[in-house]
Image: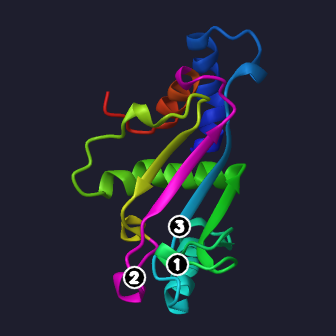
Amino acid sequence: MMLHERFKEEIVPQLMKELGYKNVMQVPRIEKVVINCGVSETDNPKVLEGVVRDLSLITGQRPVITRAKRSISDFKITKGKPVGCMVILRGVRAYVFLEKLFNLVLPKTRDFRGLSSASFDGRGNYSLGLDEQLVFPEIKYDEIEKIQGMDIIIVTTARSDREGYYLLKHLGLPFKD
């Protein structure tokens, strides 16, 4: 059973009981998943192309190239220069990506003992970072230009960290505690 179907059939009733909700619409949901990759070598266009290709393989959606908002001379960045790329996943695609992340990718990372529950932002949204894109099954080691990390932000409709924690715990996010 897919994560989205399991969420509707099993997890929503559990959360209603645990959090004491009377209405199904009060239960927190996944609003979107944002995957962001910064590119350190901005002068090499092949690295950016490789990151765009890798991110589109991982998510099944074409990434948007992000550009610098202002010039920073210490980092040799000029305004308007590409500095990374990002993808926003919504709906069923977000649940499919999260299922892959929770069940395949995170257990495959080196020295993985669970994620910290301190990475919530105060409004029920959770963020985590991965050091390399090689942990995803779609990425082949021979085809990558450079090892890149990525930030993954899970945006929920939860109003507190407690609600977000319960939602992600039931979805299968492996927390330490």
Q: Which image quarter holds the C terminus?
A: top left
For residue 22, which quarter of the picture? top right
Q: Residue at x 55, y 34 (%)?
A: 121
Q: Are marks 3 and 1 in contact (CB under 8 Å)?
A: yes
Amino acid carrying label 2: it is Lys
- Residues under labels 1 and 2: Cα distance? 8 Å
Q: Earlier in the sequence, mark 3 or mark 2?
A: 3
Q: Earlier in the sequence, mark 3 or mark 1?
A: 3
Position of 118 compared to 110: left or right?
right
Question: Mark 2, residues whose alpha carbon is within 10 Å: few (<14), some, or many (≥20)?
Answer: some
Question: Mark 3, residues whose alpha carbon is within 10 Å: few (<14), some, or many (≥20)?
Answer: many
- Residues under labels 3 and 1: Cα distance? 7 Å
What label does residue 146 carry, if any? 2
Q: Whole-percent x and y of residue 153? A: 56, 48
- Residues under labels 3 and 2: Cα distance? 12 Å
Position of 58 compared to 16: left or right?
left
Q: Which residues are magenta?
A: 138-162
Position of 18 compared to 138: left or right?
right
- Which residue, given by chain and number where applicable, does mark 1 sit on? 51
In the rendered image, the residue lying farthest to the front is 73
Q: Is residue 14 above or below residue 141?
A: above
The residue closer to the viewer here, 147 or 108, is: 147
Task: Say which element carries label 3.
Answer: strand
Residue 119 included in the magenta stretch of the image: no
Q: Earlier in the sequence, mark 1 or mark 2?
A: 1
- Which residue, given by chain and number where applicable, does mark 3 sit on? 37
The residue closer to the viewer here, 165 or 47, is: 47
Amino acid carrying label 1: it is Val
